[in-house]
Image (tube, rainbow, N blue to C red):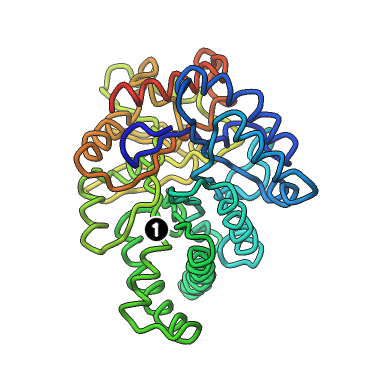
Amino acid sequence: MQIKENLHLTYCTNIHPGQDWKSTFDSIKKHVPAIKHKVSKDQPFGLGLRLSNKASEELEIGDNLFNFKKWLSENNVYVFTMNGFPYGNFHDERVKDMVHAPDWTTDKRLTYTKRLFRQLSELLPDGLNGGISTSPITYKYWHETEKDTQNAFETGAKNMLEVAKQLLELEKSTGKYLHLDIEPEPDGLLENSDEVVSFYTNYLLPLGVEYFKKELGLGQEEAEAVIKKYLTVCYDICHFSLAYEEPEDTFAKFKKENIRVGKIQVSAALKILFNGKDNERIWKELSQFNEPTYLHQVTEKIDGKVKTYSDLPLVLDGERNHKELRAHYHVPIFLEKYGELFSTQDHILKTIDFIKSNPVSEHLEIETYTWDVLPTDLKQDLTVSIIREIEWFKSHM
């Protein structure tokens, strides 16, 4: 929904089952009308669409795309952003590091993303820009040597540049501006703002200038402008809080480098503050969040540097002495505290304060996908929970 001029808010449908098109569409029809009625009754409601590869393939079969567009029109719903990070099933089975597979070193990831963009260009209303968030190239620990890592950077950059060329051509043929929003996260090949800047400086720009000169005859300045226009960043608030980065510092760094923020994903991580008195109770409550579906990296800032533990059990097994830990667990954004635990909701509030006077992105997408695996006492009706998320955010804007 449009909450300010050129500022669109939605939630990400990766919270719903979506292994194929039928289950995806069934979930949308079940939940979205009730959510819209409550939060955007008399205005169009924007949707953050998540399609698995299989759902995306099936959307193009028969009348599926036509029927979906018809349903959107009849229900006053529009699609302006998509989540192209998880390729396969995202529910009811172990995901962990395989959320990155296939990664940006593969043709499968390229084919999937280009298909999503063709579909978004069909779904996106005239006059809006559209974006698709994606993996930060690959999972860091799949590449053992420095040479392997460099190859992943290079291959990933080349595949993303192919997408940039597709988006340039789509804008020429449709008049619609679309962008690929690269999403840093813990243990991805891109984890923080410095690594994003380095990726542009050392890979996207030098490889892209050569690529666009060969493909389209563009000069250096033209090529760099194309790269930075169509390849943008997805600023996931949870992920950047895990990197211990303050929003205004990160946005200032991107602005200095002319790197655009295509989408802000509104999400909160768990924050664990140890006071030396209730540590046993804190560890016990944290252990309730240990579940087998998703990766829950844990970060700690020591002497100005961020240390990352690749999953929550590594911290729970040790129960060492810590001052503060942050866990990659997309907890509900409207709660600041969970018993003895906290959330990084303060980073959301800081981001809100910043974008009120510095509209760095037109797209805001609430992404809390962990409802199914939350501790029992935090689970509520899904539709009611999503409404509460949206209303909490709107109240602070």
Going by the numbered disc 1, the residue's amino acid type is: Thr
At x 46% / y 73%, what residue is drawn? 150
Helix, strand or loop at label 1? It is strand
In the rendering, at what x and y percent does residue 55 appear? 70, 45
Taking the image as shown, residue 148 lies to the left or right of residue 52, namely: left
The answer to whether residue 284 is visible is no
At x 49% / y 25%, what residue is drawn? 287
- Which corner quadrant of the image does residue 281 belong to? top left
Q: Nearer the viewer, residue 171 or 205?
A: 171
Q: Nearer the viewer, residue 230 or 72?
A: 72
Taking the image as shown, residue 119 lies to the left or right of residue 270, namely: right
**Mark 1 residue crowding within 10 angstroms, few (<14) / some (14–19) / many (20+):** many
In the rendering, at what x and y percent does residue 305 appear? 27, 51
Taking the image as shown, residue 371 lies to the left or right of residue 264, namely: right
In the rendering, at what x and y percent does residue 79 appear? 53, 41
In the rendering, at what x and y percent does residue 388 appear? 44, 18
- Label 1, on which residue? 232
The answer to whether residue 17 is visible is yes
User: Is 131 situated above or below 78?
Assistant: below
